[in-house]
Image (cartoon, rainbow, N blue to C red):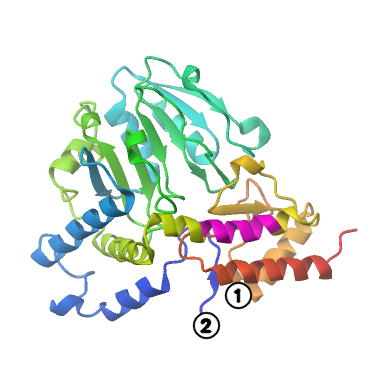
């Protein structure tokens, strides 16, 4: 069976080149006589893998020297607790709630202090990114938290919030390494890897060094950034194979030309889909134009039965996982880094054909 175009919001497609390299090295990694899946994380050969992965990510994202890179477990959702446990010194933080995950993060932070919602688009079913300026934030907040790209609703911050001296914390799970980002504008960036950089099981945290070492006394060891940083992400067994795949993904992007090139490719895919959506009236794109995500494109027909039929027929054409999230309905095309342009072309052709064959009453 030939490979399908997988539009899943995550776990999602991995680059074919990466999968082929991993397959080639599966049984015997570089003459070690074993798979990366089998080797000790304390072995010299694995030590080289994790160090190289960090070096490549630093190069790819141009991460300043005063930031630590941590390869952790527990998914981005574990960071909803780790962030307040490590960063809340006065017991106050500000949250911009622009979707389900930032809402979950805010609720989790409420267990450890005052997590104030300073802006939200919930009343409009998160169809846009709320605007903020410096005056939106509490001067005594320990940090401001945002979810930079909202997978479920198909929105992305078109701006980096101006927080002054307050550290900005961003969940970038669904947009990390999709385009260049100025890391120095953030105190902390975290991301689950299963959308753009590796299989599920790895979470990357990029944290400014001055924000480490302030964890609450009752912070679990596994959530203490200082402990993890002091042990080079090796306090316990890390998600070894995921880190290895991430390394291959970083190499793949650098081989293409880095994040500028990645952005160009991603923008081209997104433009193809959005240009079609804007050119017709069969499908409705609910997100305000200036808030549109480059990674997750949501659309509906306006008829729940037609939406179901669309997803089912698309599946039969090798266009998988296009059904929208239950809280939004309709369709969602996640077009992360590894989705080829041809996949979006095929989707647009199918959309045209479906509209022609299924006229609305």
- x, y (%) of residue 61? 33, 49
Which secondary structure type mostly characterizes the magenta part of the structure? Answer: helix
Q: CA distance from mark 1 to mark 2?
A: 9 Å
Residue 2 is labelled as 2
Q: Residue at x 60, y 75 (%)?
A: 318
Q: Is residue 230 left or right of residue 16?
A: left
Q: Which residue: 24% across, 32% down?
A: 219
Find numbered disc 2 in the image and state the secondary structure of the residue it sits on: loop
Q: Quadrant of residue 185?
A: top left
Residue placed farthest to the bottom in the image? 1
Q: Are marks 1 and 2 in contact (CB under 8 Å)?
A: yes
Answer yes or no: is residue 195 visible: no
State the image coordinates of residue 278 (x, y, percent, origin top left). Answer: 73, 53
Q: Position of residue 48 (x, y in %)?
A: 14, 62
Q: In screen coordinates, is 36 left or right of 335?
A: left
- Judging by the rendered image, the residue that carries numbered circle 1 is 318
The correct choice, above or below, for 326 with respect to 120 in the image is below
Name the image quarter holding residue 201: bottom left
**In the depicted view, which residue is nearer to us: 305 or 263?**
263
Q: Is residue 225 left or right of residue 278?
A: left
In this rendering, the answer to whether 257 lies above or below 169 is below
User: Magenta stretch containing residue 272, yes or no?
Assistant: yes
Q: Residue furthest top?
A: 139
Residue 297, image x, y percentages:
61, 53
Report helix, strand or loop for mark 1: loop
Q: Nearer the viewer, residue 218 or 21?
A: 21
Q: How many C-alpha atoms fall within 10 Å of the one at disc 2: few (<14), some, or many (≥20)?
A: few
Residue 176 part of the magenta-drawn span: no
Query: Magenta span covers which residues?
Result: 266-275
């Amino acid at each position: 069976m030939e490979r399908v175009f997988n539009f899943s919001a995550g776990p999602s497609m991995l680059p074919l080149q990466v999968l082929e390299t991993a397959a080639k090295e599966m049984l015997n990694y570089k003459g070690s006589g074993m798979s990366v899946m089998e080797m000790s994380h304390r072995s010299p050969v694995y030590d080289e893998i994790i160090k190289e992965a960090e070096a490549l990510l630093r190069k790819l994202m141009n991460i300043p020297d005063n930031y630590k890179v941590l390869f952790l477990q527990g998914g981005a959702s574990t960071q909803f607790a780790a962030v307040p446990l490590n960063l809340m010194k006065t017991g106050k933080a500000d949250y911009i709630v622009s979707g389900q995950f930032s809402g979950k993060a805010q609720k989790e932070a409420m267990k450890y202090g005052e997590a104030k919602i300073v802006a939200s688009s919930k009343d409009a079913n998160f169809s846009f990114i709320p605007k903020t300026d410096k005056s939106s934030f509490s001067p005594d907040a320990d940090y401001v938290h945002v979810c930079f790209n909202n997978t479920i609703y198909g929105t992305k911050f078109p701006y980096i919030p101006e927080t002054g001296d307050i550290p900005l914390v961003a969940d970038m799970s669904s947009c990390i390494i999709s385009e260049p980002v100025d890391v120095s504008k953030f105190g902390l960036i975290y991301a689950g890897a299963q959308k753009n950089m590796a299989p599920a099981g790895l979470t990357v945290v990029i944290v400014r060094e001055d924000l480490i070492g302030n964890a609450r006394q009752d912070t679990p060891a596994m959530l203490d950034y200082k402990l993890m940083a002091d042990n080079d992400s090796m306090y316990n067994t890390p998600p070894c194979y995921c880190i290895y795949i991430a390394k291959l993904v970083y190499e793949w992007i650098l081989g293409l030309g880095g994040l500028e090139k990645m952005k160009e490719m991603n923008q081209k895919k997104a433009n193809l889909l959005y240009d079609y959506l804007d050119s017709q009236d069969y499908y409705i794109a609910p997100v305000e134009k200036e808030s549109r995500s480059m990674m997750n494109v949501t659309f509906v027909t306006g008829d729940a039965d037609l939406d179901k039929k669309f997803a089912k027929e698309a599946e039969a054409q090798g266009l998988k996982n296009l059904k929208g999230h239950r809280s939004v309905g309709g369709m969602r095309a996640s077009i992360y880094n590894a989705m080829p342009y041809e996949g979006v072309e095929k989707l647009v052709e199918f959309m045209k054909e479906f509209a022609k064959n299924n006229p609305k009453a």
